[in-house]
Image (cartoon, grey):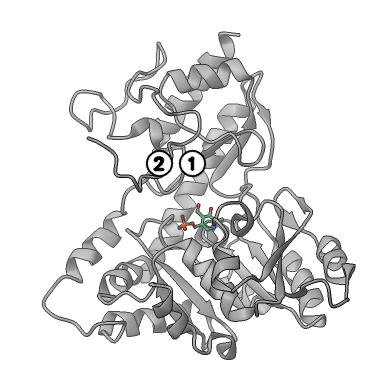
Amino acid sequence: MARSPQAVPEIPGTAGTPTAAAMPGAPAAPAIHGGTGQPAGHYLQFASDNTAGICPEALDAFVRANAGFAASYGNDDDTHTVCDRLREVFEADAEVFFVFNGTAANSVALANLCQSHQAVICSETAHVHTDECGAPEFFSGGSKLLTAPHRHGKLTAAGVQEVIQRRSDIHYPRPRVVTLTQSTEMGTLYQSGEIAGIARLAHGHGLKVHMDGARFANAAAALGGSPADITWRAGVDVLCLGGTKMGLPVGEAVIFFDRALGADFAYRCKQAGQLASKMRYLSGPWLAMLEGGTWLRHAAHANAMAQRLARHLAALPGAERLLPTEANGVFVNLPEPAIARLRAAGWAFYTFIGGGARFMCSWATTPEAVDHLAHDIGQALAAG
Ligand SMILES: Cc1ncc(COP(=O)(O)O)c(C=O)c1O
């Protein structure tokens, strides 16, 4: 079928590669999808945690949300209930909003925190800087992103301090927000003490703290304890809580722990095209995810699959671990010929995030798929 003009580019390095040819000797996987012996898109599954479909709980809830009529624009019962559930989960009387995707969540939230002459401090690796097409700058009317050095994708208090104190003259934008990504773009985690250290510094200089939580569920599952401890109790003012990567069809929550910072946010969402008229389809699935800790269970599974892959790779000569595996991503250095062989075998994965090959796991990743990938990596390395 012809692609629409709006279609996004192929994952780099995968255009034109076959998607169903396994490496010789690959273990047989259960026949789920007609003929190939693999589920549809099997070879795409480690490219991102959003190549997975909707998890069953969210899908059921999506169908349930479709019963009859409901008030629009977030005035329905499910939306009210899920906002209350999020307040319970985070133990905070927060303002909660739902938007369609992570780019919108981050950029519209940052725009609410920052005037156009002010600046957002982020890591050099932050999604807001590298992968949002200037949306934070656009929605804020020009707030500049100021990058700070990182360690394994994490900002350090010293790096943030240097940016805050770099300039105070009229010619430089005034830092107003620090944004942290949890878990980071490089698959690592901020411990609550690290967040608190940066937040103390930020607040001490009159800055607010925003958290890009596209993969917050993976962080919360890995760190354990109360989500409040790694957000507002550690000094986070606003959390963009990812839903898509944890198994929702679409939708992220924006949680203002400091309600005052959420003033007029509903208007910004509307102006940005982020106010869903049939909000129940966003909020219903959220409700199912929060029920009985489903979100954390799925995230813990994704994390466990990443650990399984990391264990396999640790045993493979030639696979050099690039970063600690702390959440649901595995980053490894592979020689170019091995990368080419894996791609020729059909596997899709990024190589420009984190400096090596990135393999992401999701709620839908199976141990068999991990073993298959690890087997093929082993074969690709062994071929020299
Ligand atoms: C760290 C991070 N933040 C935000 C997003 C959300 O982006 P999107 O607008 O594609 O939902 C992503 C998606 O890859 C991400 O990795």
- The part of the image, by quadrant, that contains residue 45 is top left
Q: Residue at x 84, y 78 (%)?
A: 170
Locate residue 285, reporting x and y percent. 30, 67
Q: Nearer the viewer, residue 328 or 45?
A: 45
Residue position for label 1: 305
Relative to 160, does residue 314 appear above or below in the rendering?
above
The reply to whether discs 2 and 1 touch (Cβ–Cβ < 8 Å) is yes
The kind of residue on which mark 1 rests is Met
Q: CA distance from mark 2 to mark 1?
A: 7 Å
Looking at the rendered image, the quarter that the N terminus falls into is top left
Which of 54/191 is in front? 54
Q: Residue furthest top?
A: 383
Q: Secondary structure at mark 2?
A: loop
Q: Is residue 168 above or below residue 188?
A: below
Seen in the image, is 208 located left or right of residue 288?
right
Q: Residue at x 35, y 18 (%)?
A: 21
Residue receiving disc 2 = 365
Q: Quadrant of residue 318?
A: top right
> Closest to the observer: 317 or 239?
239
Label 2 sits on what residue type? Thr
Dot 2 surroundings within 10 Å: few (below 14), some, or many (20 or more)? many
- Residue at the limit of the structure toward the left, as seen here: 68
Residue 244 is situated, as x and y percent measured from the top left of the image, at 40, 58
**Local secondary structure at mark 1:** helix
